[in-house]
Amino acid sequence: MRSQQFSEWIFVFLLVGIVLFSGIIVALMFNISRKDNLKTGERWMLAAIILGVVAAVIIGALQMLAGYLF
C-alpha cells in the first residue's frame, strides 16, 4: 500500500513539473516585449524543455495505463 501512495505523489510531482515548464514555454513563446528572435542557445533550451514536457506526459500516461495509479 505504501508503494501506491509513493506512485501517486510521484504522479502529482510530475503534473506540477508539466504545469511549471509549460508556463515557461508559454512565457518564452509569447513574450511581447522581445523585439528580436530567440538566440540559438535559447532555441535549444526551449526545445529541451518541450521534449521534457512531452516525455513527462508520456510517462504519466504509461503510469496510468499500466495501473500503477488508482
Image (cartoon, rainbow, N blue to C red):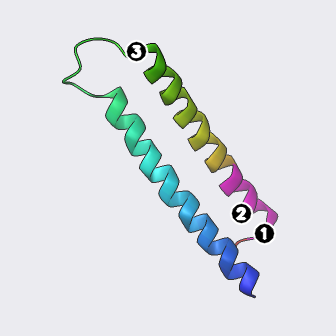
Q: Which residue carries the number 1 mark?
A: 67
- CA separation, marks 3 and 2? 38 Å
Q: Quadrant of the N terminus?
A: bottom right
Labels 3 and 1 touching (C-beta < 8 A): no
Element at badge 3? loop
The tag on residue 13 is none
Q: Position of residue 60 (x, y in %)?
A: 66, 56
**Which span of residues is magenta-colored?**
59-68
Q: Which residue carries the number 2 mark?
A: 64
Q: Earlier in the sequence, mark 3 or mark 2?
A: 3
> Where is residue 24, by image quadrant?
top left
Q: Nearer the viewer, mark 3 or mark 2?
A: 3
The residue under the point 81% across, 63% down is 66
Number of on-image labels: 3
Amino acid at the residue labelled 2: Met
Q: Position of residue 41 (x, y in %)?
A: 47, 20
Give the side of residue 7 with respect to residue 53, left or right.
Answer: right
The residue under the point 55% across, 67% down is 12
Labels 1 and 2 touching (C-beta < 8 A): yes
58 in relation to 49, above or below: below
Amino acid at the residue labelled 3: Lys
The residue under the point 63% across, 73% down is 8
Element at badge 1? loop
In this view of the protein, can residue 70 be seen by the observer?
no
> Where is residue 27, by image quadrant?
top left
- CA separation, marks 1 and 2? 5 Å
Element at badge 2? helix
The tag on residue 39 is 3
- CA separation, marks 3 and 1? 42 Å
